[in-house]
Image (cartoon, rainbow, N blue to C red):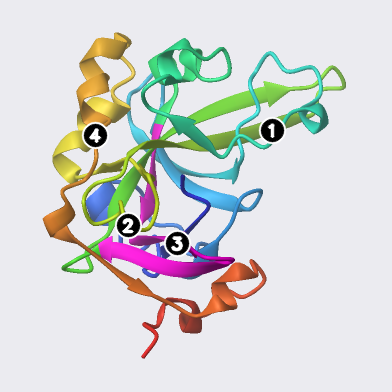
């Protein structure tokens, strides 16, 4: 599962990594939560050119009659995503990258749940594997949304939680975004646990429990 994440660098700083035009209106975030707008990188279906967009985190399938009646779809299990009606079309035609540099997970210890921040050892940014959808209501209203894919936990994550988000490195970006690649079997190998030896996890303040707290205090290690 992944219910919160961070992007401490601005999208302007990451423009070269993701090969997109910088957006000065996107800023550093320390506690990104479901239903909030998140930055995604996707390929235009016609030109194949990458573009940066803000989508609501919580996918609404295109066939939905009323988004208010659906449960909030923030994660999709990579093992079953190709078979789920809510996700299978997006997996073929509407894949995206969600820039990040860390995420949070909560470890249950007795009655308590302790937050951890997980990131790469070197602190470098990366991308979650995501899917996006375009929904249009009968009244003409439109909504673009996204979901993050998850996989089984690696050795580092396993004591904290049994799931983790699918993390992609730059060599994977082209394949994941290519609109011409519509065969699920070609992208399925990317949906794997990230190497544990490349990551670090440390406990952080309960401040992160409240999505209104969005400051650097959320990511500071507890002493």
Q: Is residue 51 magenta?
A: no
First in sequence: mark 2 vs mark 3: 3
Region of the chain picked out in magenta, as a range: 96-119
Task: Look at discs 4 and 1 and give the one toward the viewer.
Answer: 4
Q: Residue 143 carries which label?
A: 1
Kindly indicate whether the residue at mark 1 contacts the one at mark 4 (C-beta within 8 angstroms).
no
Q: Indicate left or right for 143 with 168 as reference.
A: right
Kindly report which numbered mark, 3 or 4, lies closer to the viewer in this rendering.
3
Which residue is located at x 25 percent, y 21 percent?
187
Q: What element carries label 1?
A: strand
Q: Identify the residue position indicated by label 4 in the image.
A: 192
Residue tagged 2 = 159
Does residue 58 sit above or below 219 in this rendering?
A: above
Task: Assign a secondary structure to mark 4.
Answer: loop
Q: Nearer the viewer, residue 45 or 63?
A: 63
Judged by depth in the image, the label closer to the viewer, 2 or 4, is 2
For residue 13, say whether it is visible.
no
Give residue 16's position: percent from left, percent from top.
Answer: 24, 54
Give the CA distance from mark 3 to mark 4: 22 Å
Whole-angstrom CA distance, mark 1 to mark 2, is 37 Å
């Amino acid at each position: 599962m992944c219910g919160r994440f961070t992007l401490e660098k601005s999208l302007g700083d990451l423009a070269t990594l993701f090969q997109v035009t910088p957006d000065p209106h996107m800023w550093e975030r320390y506690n990104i939560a479901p239903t909030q707008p998140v930055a995604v990188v996707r390929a235009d279906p016609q030109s194949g050119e990458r573009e940066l967009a803000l989508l609501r985190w919580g996918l609404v399938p295109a066939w939905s009659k009323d988004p208010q009646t659906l449960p909030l779809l923030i994660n999709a299990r990579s093992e079953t995503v190709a078979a789920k009606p809510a996700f299978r079309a997006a997996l073929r035609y509407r894949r995206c990258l969600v820039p990040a540099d860390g995420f949070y997970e909560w470890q249950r210890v007795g009655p308590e749940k302790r937050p951890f921040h997980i990131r790469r050892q070197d602190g470098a940014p990366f991308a979650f594997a995501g899917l996006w959808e375009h929904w249009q209501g009968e009244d003409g209203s439109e909504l673009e949304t996204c979901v993050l894919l998850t996989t089984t936990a690696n050795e580092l994550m396993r004591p904290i939680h049994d799931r983790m988000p699918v993390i992609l490195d730059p060599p994977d970006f082209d394949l994941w975004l290519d609109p011409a690649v519509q065969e699920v079997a070609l992208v399925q190998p990317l949906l794997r646990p990230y190497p544990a030896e490349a990551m670090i996890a440390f406990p952080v303040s309960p401040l992160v429990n409240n999505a209104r707290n969005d400051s650097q205090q959320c990511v500071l290690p507890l002493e």
